[in-house]
Amino acid sequence: MQEHSIGYNNSRTENSTIGGFCLSGRVEKTSTWTRQDLLAMEAVEANDILLACGSGEHKGRISQCRGVLLTDIINSAKVIVTDHNDTKKMFVVASATDGYTTVFSWQEIFNTSVGAGIMIMLEKDGKPVYEGRGSMDLFSVGDFLTGPRYVKRLANLDIRMLG
């Protein structure tokens, strides 16, 4: 099992409004999130994270990363829930600018320790992600194999429901 720590840090390192991602789907209003928007939110840090692809091959380490939790982004949106059991059927599709896509179930995000480490990454190893270009990554610190759900240059978070 991977060992890593997540802590909160509100320091800001960059003031850019270029780029961003869209939050859409089962929300009252589709919204665009910029780097500037996320810098205004509470940030978390994770340290000493192994990068491993789906085969388990090690691809390196991230000594430190900083970002905003996916739960905080979702909680700030007005998600459409009409029935008590809706969230049991909901999931989030995260897509990159190049079309790369991955999925997180609602219960995984809000009801497991994995969810406590899914972040929109703003900094990696002390430097802004895509310095000066505004793009951000989505990364799941708690995954055993971090590569398959590492969404580089996040473009869209789409909240959906089965059925």
Image: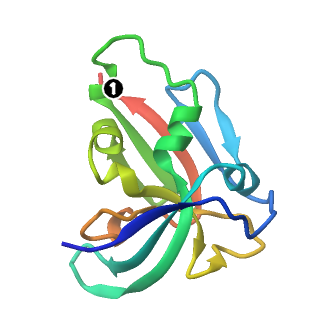
Say which amino acid is labelled 1.
Thr
Image position, residue 38 (x, y; %): 67, 52
Q: Nearer the viewer, residue 8 or 111?
A: 8
- Between 12 and 154, the residue placed more toward the observer is 12
Q: Residue at x 21, y 77 (%)?
A: 55
Q: What x and y, as percent, mark residue 103?
A: 36, 49
Residue 58 % position (x, y): 29, 86
Quadrant location of the C terminus in the rendered image: top left
In the picture, measured across the screen, residue 80 lies left or right of residue 90, that is right
Picture coordinates of residue 41, whole percent (x, y): 65, 49
Q: Which residue, given by chain and number where applicable, does mark 1 sit on?
A: 87
Residue 151 in the image: above or below residue 113: below
Q: Secondary structure at mark 1?
A: helix
Is 38 situated above or below 32?
below
Quarter of the rendering containing residue 16: bottom right
Residue at point 50%, 39% (across, down) = 158
- Which residue is depicted at the point 35% across and 39% down? 110
In the displayed structure, would residue 80 be above or below residue 6?
Answer: above
Q: Quadrant of the N terminus?
A: bottom left
Q: Residues within 10 Å of mark 1 (few under 14, many from 20)?
A: some
Up the image or down, 153 lies above or below 125; here it is above
